[in-house]
Amino acid sequence: EVQLVESGGGLVQAGGSLRLTCAASGLTFADHTIGWFRLAPGKEREGISCLSSRDGGTYYADSVKGRFTISRDNARNTVYLQMNSLKPEDTAVYYCAGSRRNRYSAKANEYDYWGQGTQVTVSS
């Protein structure tokens, strides 16, 4: 059984930083494309960052480009999302997801495995 577990969310002031962690069991991150998505109240789920298993290529949505960084630790089978210069509009539940496809994608329907999410709240 595949399980993805996110952690690291919390409450932070605008301009602050958080690092989200996604730990996997039953799945090897090195063999899967990884995506981070977020869902804010009243908004559609947004794919914000992806890491391709094929070539390590990365994708960032314009809303987070230059502020967020996705990375992977193969030895720990863990994926991270470093979030800097946080803004109130970054407030959302953040999810990590794994895809058997080897190319990155910001489309949620291309991901096969999902974590339960972690809440990030940025105060102004």
Image (tube, rainbow, N blue to C red):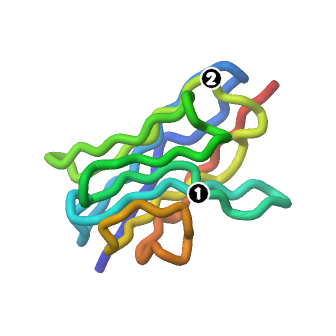
Q: Could you tell me which secondary element the residue under label 2 belongs to?
A: loop
Going 28% across and 49% down the picture, which residue do you hit? 56
Compare residues 20 and 67 and report the one nearer the observer.
67
Q: Amino acid at mark 2?
A: Ser
Of marks 2 and 1, the one in the foreground: 1
State the residue position of label 1: 47
Going 45% across and 35% down the picture, which residue do you hit? 69
Q: Could you tell me which secondary element the residue under label 1 belongs to?
A: strand
Going 72% across and 23% down the picture, which residue do you hit? 14
Residue 85 quadrant: top right
Q: Quick check: 20 above or below 94?
A: above
Q: Quick check: 107 above or below 72?
A: below
Residue 110 location (% of width, % of height): 48, 75
Q: The N terminus appears in which quarter of the rendering?
A: bottom left
Q: The C terminus appears in which quarter of the rendering?
A: top right
The image shows a total of numbered marks equal to 2
Residue 2 location (% of width, % of height): 32, 74
Query: Is 94 situated left or right of 3 in this image?
Result: right
Q: Quick check: 38 above or below 84?
A: below
Compare residues 5 and 98 and report the one nearer the observer.
98
Q: Amino acid at mark 1?
A: Gly
Compare residues 81 and 23 and report the one nearer the observer.
81
Residue 81 location (% of width, % of height): 45, 40
Residue 41 quadrant: bottom right
Q: Which mark is residue 85?
A: 2
Whichever of callouts 2 and 1 sits on the residue coming sooner in the sequence is 1
Asked whether the beta carbons under mark 2 and mark 1 sit within 8 Å of each other, the answer is no
Q: Within 10 Å of the Cα at label 1, are there few (<14), some (14-19), or many (20+) other Cα atoms?
A: many
Q: Quick check: 8 above or below 117?
A: above
Distance from the alpha carbon under mark 2 to that under mark 1: 19 Å
Q: Within 10 Å of the Cα at label 2, are there few (<14), some (14-19), or many (20+) other Cα atoms?
A: some
Residue 74 location (% of width, % of height): 18, 49
